[in-house]
Image: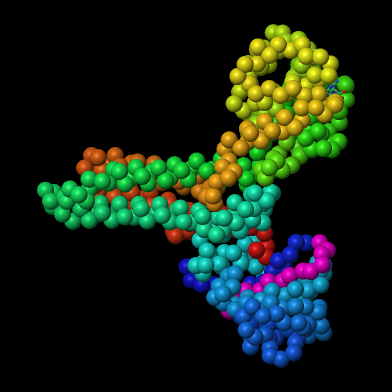
Amino acid sequence: MQAPDDTIAAIGTAPGTGGIAVVRVSGPRTMEIADRIVRCAAPRPSMRRTMSVIYGHIAAAAGDVDEVLVLVMKGPGSYTREDMIEIQGHGGRVMASAVLQTVLDAGARLAEPGEFTKRAFLNGRIDLTQAEAVADIVGARSRRAGRAALEQLEGSLSDAVNALYDRLMGIAADMEATLDFPEEDIPEALIQDVPDRISRAVSEMDLLISSWQEGRLLREGALIVISGRTNVGKSTLLNALLDTDRAIVSHIPGTTRDIIEEGLVLDGIPVRLVDTAGLRETSCEIESEGIRRTMRHIARADLQLHVLDSSQESGNEFDAQISGLDPIRTILVLNKTDLGVRICRDNLNGFTCVETSLLNRTGLEALKKEIRRALMQDIKMDAPPHAVISERHRQLLLKAREDALGADSLFGQDDIAMASSRLRESIEHVGLITGRVYQEDLLKAVFSKFCIGK
Ligand SMILES: Nc1nc2c(ncn2[C@@H]2O[C@H](COP(=O)(O)OP(=O)(O)O)[C@@H](O)[C@H]2O)c(=O)[nH]1
Ligand SMILES: [Mg+2]
């Protein structure tokens, strides 16, 4: 693909009022546009050194638009590798729009979402995983998620994927070299270790694939669903964890009928906490729909907090309730201990149980500790910078893995030509992760998730 030859502009700050609004401009005509619209003391913008700041005014035909600071960043030492300016004006949408309009009138066109970052990719400054990291940084919902994205921007994932790419290329090259030899002369040493080398590459893929769950938790947040019969204290639990009065709590069974979802951050992991309608037989249509929704959420949950009234004795109905739960993904909250504990713990073997009296706020810290422990199973908290992949990366790695294993088995059958062509397919899938190989629709899919001005 050719380097873009037009000049783009957009407001880079969020809509609404704020102290400063920034208009970004990038492309070959940037300096010419700056000279035309920035009224300042000599020298004019194009004659300034890169990374310098100009104080001045944005001037249009009708007069001055705003009093501004202009950052001059000349290519290739800029975000996009092109000539760029960033115009810092007084905050507010109206003024920023007026500055942007002046830039557009002088010859730029409005940038598409993510187009600045796309140019950084097309101009070879960053690869596709790094471009995706930029969107993840902007969208980060916790410091920890932001840090993981920053590590990806700095190349943690690129390095791992490039090493894998080179390893596979080396194997393919050696395989293809043997094709030039007549049957009887295939150099033993050259081909003897091919299965080992493929299996090492597959292990590297497995390691990357195993980071998907962590990446997903950081990007999307963990889904924690609070479940249980009516009136056991589910909504009280949601409020206690959020430290607010978000959900209505009452002694009337069936109070919560719809799903209530709130976000919070637990030890750097973004969490979506969901309170549900209590599970019980009901003739109320609204409540029935609430219960159907509850079941759907439970099916997707990373962790289920199942609340029980510990002051009630356990019976058959109770056993049925417990038997439907997955001990690995469930914490049992034995609530209302202030009313006495009559529940029989023997039936709860295999489950993590925490006793609480949410009315008195006891047991809450112990519960939070168990929640963290359950979520952390998938997260290497103290690990050095390491790559965590996204769903797009995972899909490509799974395909690359299948191709590599296919190549291995063809190689075992002495079909070296087919084996090397299968390995080439594996390499291509790995290449799509970093964008060594790409098509326009791949770029569209990646950059459509960006905001304008990034
Ligand atoms: N005694 C006692 N009552 C509680 C406790 N937790 C909640 N409750 C009460 O139980 C009733 C039902 O609570 P709620 O959170 O609405 O239950 P939900 O139907 O499961 O959402 C309310 O009157 C709460 O005040 C507790 O630990 N002890
Ligand atoms: Mg409720």
Closest to the observer: 275 or 362? 362
**Position of residue 49 measured from the top left corner of the image (x, y, whole percent):** 62, 84
Does residue 175 lie above or below 59 as drawn? above
Closest to the observer: 430 or 191? 191
Quadrant of the rendered image containing residue 399: top left
Q: How is the image coloured?
A: rainbow
* Residue at the image position 35 percent from the left and 52 percent from the top: 168
* Residue at the image position 45 percent from the left and 46 percent from the top: 397
Quadrant of the rendered image containing residue 403: top left
Total marks shown come to 0
Residue 444 shows in the view:
no
**Position of residue 392 measured from the top left corner of the image (x, y, whole percent):** 53, 48
Part of the protein shown in magenta: 16-28
Closest to the observer: 278 or 217? 217
Residue 90 shows in the view:
yes
**Position of residue 306 measured from the top left corner of the image (x, y, whole percent):** 71, 24
The furthest residue to the bottom: 42
* Residue at the image position 65 percent from the left and 39 percent from the top: 222
Does residue 220 lie above or below 372 as drawn? below
Does residue 164 lie above or below 356 as drawn? below
| Quadrant of the frame with the C terminus | bottom right
> Is residue 208 left or right of 333 when viewed as pictured?
left
* Residue at the image position 59 percent from the left and 64 percent from the top: 117
Residue 246 within the magenta-colored segment of the rendering: no
> Is residue 103 left or right of 408 when viewed as pictured?
right
Q: Ligand 1 appears in which quadrant?
A: top right
**Position of residue 36 measured from the top left corner of the image (x, y, whole percent):** 70, 86
Residue 17 within the magenta-colored segment of the rendering: yes
Quadrant of the rendered image containing residue 133: bottom right
